Image: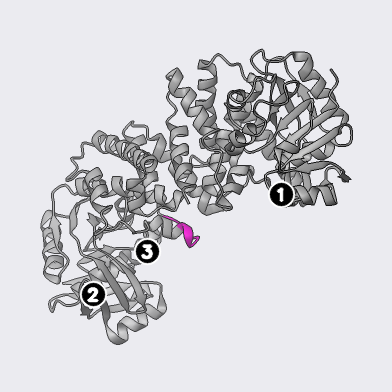
Amino acid sequence: MAIERVCVVGAGVIGSLYAAHLARVADVSVLTRRDEHARALNERGLRVSGKSDFTARLRATNDPQELSDFDLAIVATKATQLGEAAAKLAGRFPNATVMTIQNGLGAEELVRGFGDWPLVSAVTFMSGVRHDDAHVEYELDTETWLGPYAGTCSFERAQEIEALLASSGLHARAFPDLLPAQWSKLIFNATVNTVSALTDLPHIGQFAARDAPTDLGHLVHDLMAEGKAVAAAAGVGLHEDPWEMNVHAVRRGETLAAEGHYAHVPSMLEDVRARRATEIDFITGALVREAERLGVPVPLHSAMYRLVKARSAY
Amino acid sequence: MRVAVIGCGAVGSLFAANLGTLDEVEVWAYDQWREHVDAINANGLRLSGAGEVVGRVRATADASELPACDFGIVATKSMHTSAAVEATAHAFEQGAVCSVQNGAGNEELVAEHVREVIRGTTFPAGHVVEPGHVGWDTKGDTHIGPFEPQPAPMEKVRELADTCTRGGMPTHALEDARGAQWRKLIFNAASNAIGALTGFTHGRIAEFPPTRELAWAVMAEGRAVSDAQGIVLDMSPEELFDHAARKDVAYGHKPSMLQDVEAERETEVDFLNGAVVAFGERYGVDAPLNRALTALIKARTAA
């Protein structure tokens, strides 16, 4: 069954990037939280600048009853708003495939509580900056990785989504098993986001510096080593080494900085600066809970979890 | 007796002004803040708050003006210890020098420039109100003892303790002052670093379960490093933590490291959490949480 109708749930930066690009190759509807956000999208379209430059026409609403049938839902809310979003689809759209894109672990299980849709797991490395309700800047045009979740959907379906995303101008890769990639990103995120939120530093060269004994790179490396021990105990072989991801991202950031771009501010630091709820429970919290279940000590991640819980207890 | 206070900020001023009330003591103060020096020389050094005191103190920003002294009391921020003691060491060729600074590792730096060294820990706290005037926020005891690798003789330690006590700063002379020093260090390393990274006051750290659990884990590392050195703590740092968290004690107190971070100043983390790590390495005890906190604070203040 071809994917012709897509519903993007949540129009933050990531949701907006999917919706705008996909609107060039599919019939796209957007479910927003706020009425004025939906109205701005309907009236002005959705503008993308940066790595792409166009304005997409699409339909938006904040009323789930107004949604017509679709073949694919991309749930792109923050992990903290996932339950609320999934509840809006509950019991409906039996023929749709649902793709989750949240940071951390546990999004698929949560969505499963609201319907028995075939589920596709995904992680994305794209990033952007929100300028206003109808304008998002595409910053890093990196890949979205996706794969069938726990036998609920076929690999072929994941490959169809990969092809759809690619035809819209985004970068995507389908995997028969996403867990290795999901865990690579989980360990990367649990480390980089918490260190950034606590030091107020964007993801810059210091994260990979290990010259002096107190250099930040040692802590980053130690946190990743704890995370890798949990993955190993869970029987997950990592897709990419998180430390290599860190070094690579920092180098790419330095190249961009030399070209006059701003350094990437991880979302948890953005949240803390804006005094918003963070995804700490879904990222580091998920890692610590897995570690406890498996009996792997993670004293450093526990410390980071506690510090960020306090830092975000506004 | 002639005493020079090296670093006449809030804590240094509490010692200098109180000692300056004693007829038999000639008190000098060495500090880089010119307006403070001039005000002290013009009107004396004034304390208000927990005690009303005006002490006779001769202040200078020029180390070469310091005459030979019987005692030095070092009260600079820890990152300035080396430079301040090196500049003033000529005044202590026959004298003994006591650190009353935060954390551990200051006596080692003093000993690089001075022969007779005294280890010290002090609890009174204050804040600078204006040049020549310091607010005395809390009274408290001071514990001093010979610095083992390069000790001042015990009779000198007693003489300094007696003089401070007579001046209004209750001071105990101990053969081994490490127990008092490490009790305060273990407490401070937990409260200061967690406060600086979370923005919490001391009381919030103690009552919010995640930070309370972390504080206890950080203090457990400090205890292990202290135990490995054979130090007997004079009181439980955990009890001190809970005592300080009381609404009538220091619930709303912003740890000094948090104040430093908010003011974008350099912190004393190398002498607190960094010292726990460094002494741990010397005695074969790993302190990963203190190491992590040190790295986070250093990154935070380098930003």
Report crowding for label 2: few under 14, some 14 to 19, many 20 or more residues within 10 A (C-alpha).
Answer: many
Between B68 and A243, the one nearer to me in the picture: A243
x, y percentage for residue B138? 24, 65
Residue sitting at x 30%, y 36%:
B220
Figure quadrant of residue B24: bottom left
Is residue A227 one of those drawn in magenta? no
**Colour setting:** one colour
Tell me the chief SS of the magenta region: loop
Figure quadrant of residue B97: bottom left
The residue where tag 2 is placed is B17
Side (left or right) of B24 relative to A249: left
Report crowding for label 1: few under 14, some 14 to 19, many 20 or more residues within 10 A (C-alpha).
Answer: few
Side (left or right) of B129 relative to A264: left
Q: Name the subunit of mark 2.
A: B
Amino acid on which the number 3 mark rests in the picture: Ala
Figure quadrant of residue A28: top right
Task: Find the magenta span and give its range.
Answer: B261-267
Picture layout, residue B140 above or below residue A266: below
- In the rendered image, the quadrant that contains the N terminus of chain B is bottom left
Amino acid on which the number 1 mark rests in the picture: Asp
- Residue B84: which numbered mark, if any? 3
- In three-dimensional space, the C-alpha distance between marks 2 and 1, rounded to whole angstroms, equals 66 Å
Side (left or right) of B53 relative to B216: left
Q: Is residue A139 visible?
A: no
The residue where tag 1 is placed is A35
